[in-house]
Image (cartoon, helix red, strand yellow):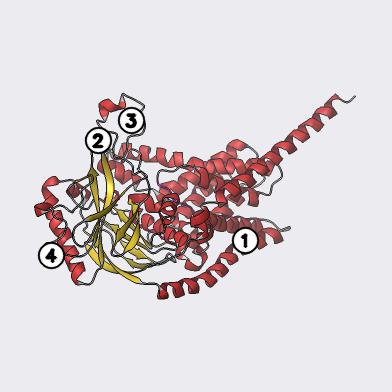
Amino acid sequence: MTGWGRALFALGAGALVAGSVVNPTGRPLPALAFPFAAALVFLFDEEVQSYGRAAWLGWLAGFGCNAVAFYWIVGLLREFAHFPLVAALPVAALLWAAQGLTVALATTFAHAARRGGAPLWIALPLGLLAAFGGSPTLFPWNPSAGLVEWSAMAQVAELGGAPILDAVLLFAGAGLGETLRRTERRALPAAVALAAFAVPLAFGAVRLPQLAEARAAAPTLRVGVVQPNVGIHEKHDRTLAPTHLRQLRAMTQELEREGAEVVLWPETAYPYPMGRGMGWEPMGAYRMRQPGSRVPLLAGTITRGGECERWNSVVSVQPEGRIAGVADKVVLLSFGETVPLWHVLPPLRHFFRCPGLTPGDEPAVLPSAGTHVGVLNCYEDVLADATRAVALRDPRWLANFTNDAWFGDTAEPHLHQLIARLRAIETRRELVRAVNTGVSSHIGADGVPLVETATFTEARFIAEVRLLEGTTFFTRVGDWVTPLVLGALAGLLVLAWMRRRGGAAICGRSGREP
């Protein structure tokens, strides 16, 4: 294969794994993800002899993956940063390139381990798992995200979260690639590929009936969800606040008539800031619910303290109007919600009067409708650690409050929904998502959506949420796969170094002998 052909092949391999979650069908296509590792095994044949070439091909695969998964960054820059297309494209490309370094790091590690004698089809998945598990990204997602669509296979996530699904994907793909490219010694990689595919399916076949039985026996809570579909520019037009509040009240009243036992409003849906420490819902023109309404409410809002103290919060309003608790967003988005280094770099204070939002002190579980709900604010439902921290407080169900209007009519809301489905499997809690412009949903504890709304439409629905108990292995232990992989990879690299050092010493002695 020529150099250009190898480069295009690497770009295509990356684009393929991204296409498994972002594609014109609007649904995940998990089968597209498996050739990713197989393609990289084919790329790194005996012709790839240098670290530079290994890193280059890995970076191209990472760039192709990010360019497809995050194509909507271009539109985001044009809409909110007012970049012309000629500026938005290179800035977005810089982001895709930066996040592509994750795969470059992985292929470099794999090449080092291979030079030390490790089989490529083992070293490559280990390198990719280590890089994906340990590298920061602007929008966290994993290459196996689409596997949640194959419900039986995805159930192993309760044991090891997203990293264990990544391991399934990568070892199955790499084993398959090694089997196809060799004419001998194919038994072991073929067996590993088959086991990586079959064992999760067998586990799911056992667990799914058990989950169905647990769900049938659990008590039910009727949760109403409001999707007001307020555009991002309208949302920040203060003159429209009374109109938006009337809409929220009316939709809540309809859900109450339909039998909702609690109603959810999306992130910052309440259009007025609330004072920190308020004991009761606002009254008069600022009242949250219609007079006479008795349905409990979980509402996204901004709460305020001092001049620069603002929290992205969810408040729990009881039937009589008392505020029973407040859950603040703990993990803030850099640049979007907070100014990094504002407190340590004084010049930043000349440009930004305040550092942004204030993070919450700890994850929160709120009382509502006679039970306890774990609150995930904004993109916290794509963060496994944030969701696990909430699940450790033993809620009976989870609720996510999000505003994805920023991203427009792109794949981002659907990608957000897809990743959130994995959180339900990891914690074995049903998850209800109230999203301003969609996708709002009710996700079962098996990761299967029971209700999904269309994006950019006004919608409401009632979710029959099952209140479940118990703690999964992943909730108790967390991500054990990534540390194990890092240890295995470190061992391979040490062995490679020792082997090369030993070889150099032998060559040196040979050179000194007469």
| Image location of residue 465, percent across then percent down | 34, 68
Q: Nearer the viewer, mark 4 or mark 2?
A: 4
Side (left or right) of 280 relative to 194: left
Residue lying at the far right of the rendered structure: 514
In this view, the residue in front, 406 or 344, is: 344
The residue tagged 1 is 193
Name the secondary structure under disc 3.
loop
The residue tagged 2 is 308
Q: Is residue 77 magenta?
A: no
First-in-chain label (3 vs 2):
2
Stretch of the chain drawn in magenta: 139-143
Whole-number angstrom distance, CA of label 4 to CA of label 1: 61 Å
In this view, the residue in front, 388 or 396, is: 396
Viewer can see residue 43: no
Whole-number angstrom distance, CA of label 3 to CA of label 2: 12 Å
The residue tagged 4 is 292
First-in-chain label (4 vs 1):
1
Q: Residue at x 15, y 55 (%)?
A: 245
Q: Which mark is residue 342?
A: 3
| Image location of residue 144, percent across then percent down | 49, 56
Q: Is residue 289 above or below residue 502?
A: below
Q: Is residue 140 magenta?
A: yes
Residue type, label 3 = Trp
